[in-house]
Image (tube, grey):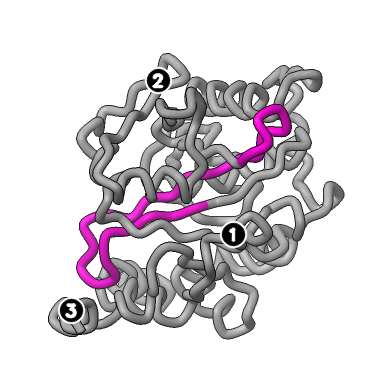
Amino acid sequence: MNKLLHKVAHKCKRHPMLYFVRYALLSKNHTAKNADAIGCFNDSNTMDSIPKLYFEVNAKINVDPTQDELEKALTIGKFLRKTIVGGSGIGLSSEKTLEMMLAGEGGVCSDFAQVFNIFCFINGIRVKEWGTVDCFYKTKFGHSFNEIYSTQQQKWIAIDIHKAIIFEDVAHNNFFSVIDLFNDLRAGNPLRAKHYSEYMTWQQERIPLVYSQHAMPFLIENKENSIVDYYYNKLQNSMPIVIINVLLVLLRKNQTFIFVLDDYKMKLLPKYFQNLKLSS
């Protein structure tokens, strides 16, 4: 019975309608002007809720506490991409996810973003998690990345740990925040992605795809790490991940997707109606 349940769950989780329903149920709209105040991982977590494994691994990263948050974040990013090969998606509790990634048993963009959140939190770096998608039904891509706050530069800075890149704001001799990056792309300007480590993704062609003027960025507002971990730890050995995620939605312990540059309700409509609304 368990095998059958896992087969059905695996088949369902790949269905495009499931992605559509997920965005329909979990999304909210918000104004970009006030986005600085929402979605920060640090505001909903405490140090004593972080699994011991993270502190053990963090001791090996050798983050310099005197550096600015951007430099500390880049040190963490370099360590993760040097240490973790990556692979298929994991999406379990934060401890199990890191354990499997370190063992070479997988890790996609969302897994990298998840563990990066926690290492930033341990090192006093304010951090957010973002996603980007091209559409809600039959998507060509979905991607997760992060944003950290630099005290020295007094701004949020987008950083992609999975692809080991940050984004140059050439006009201001600086790096882009997420909102400024996508506004710049939508203004027709070219993407300037800078690799900050020796790691180079073998999917270079995906970088200008997920970071384009047509992509829709959204904040991933996480719940308390310890609460989500509790359900995964309790259930991950007895039921498929997709069923656990459905349970979290029903219990309202799930993530929320916050769209700051696009009206997600309009984007849920078929293309014909979206164009009709835009032209009216």
Disc 1 versus disc 2: nearer the observer: 1
**What residue appears at the point 23 percent right and 63 percent down from the top-left corner?**
139
The quadrant the N terminus occupies is bottom left
Left or right: where does residue 229 sit relative to residue 131? Answer: right
Across and down, in percent, residue 130 comes to 49, 53
Reading the image, the residue beneath label 2 is: 199
Find residue 87 and name its label: none
The image quadrant that residue 2 belongs to is: bottom left
Left or right: where does residue 122 sit relative to residue 260? Answer: right
In this rendering, the answer to whether 227 lies above or below 268 is above
**Boundaries of the magenta span:** 130-155
Q: Is residue 147 shown in magenta? A: yes
Disc 3 versus disc 2: nearer the observer: 3
Reading the image, the residue beneath label 3 is: 279
Amino acid type, residue under disc 3 in the picture: Ser
Find residue 35 and name its label: 1
* Farthest right residue in view: 48
In this rendering, the answer to whether 91 lies above or below 127 is below
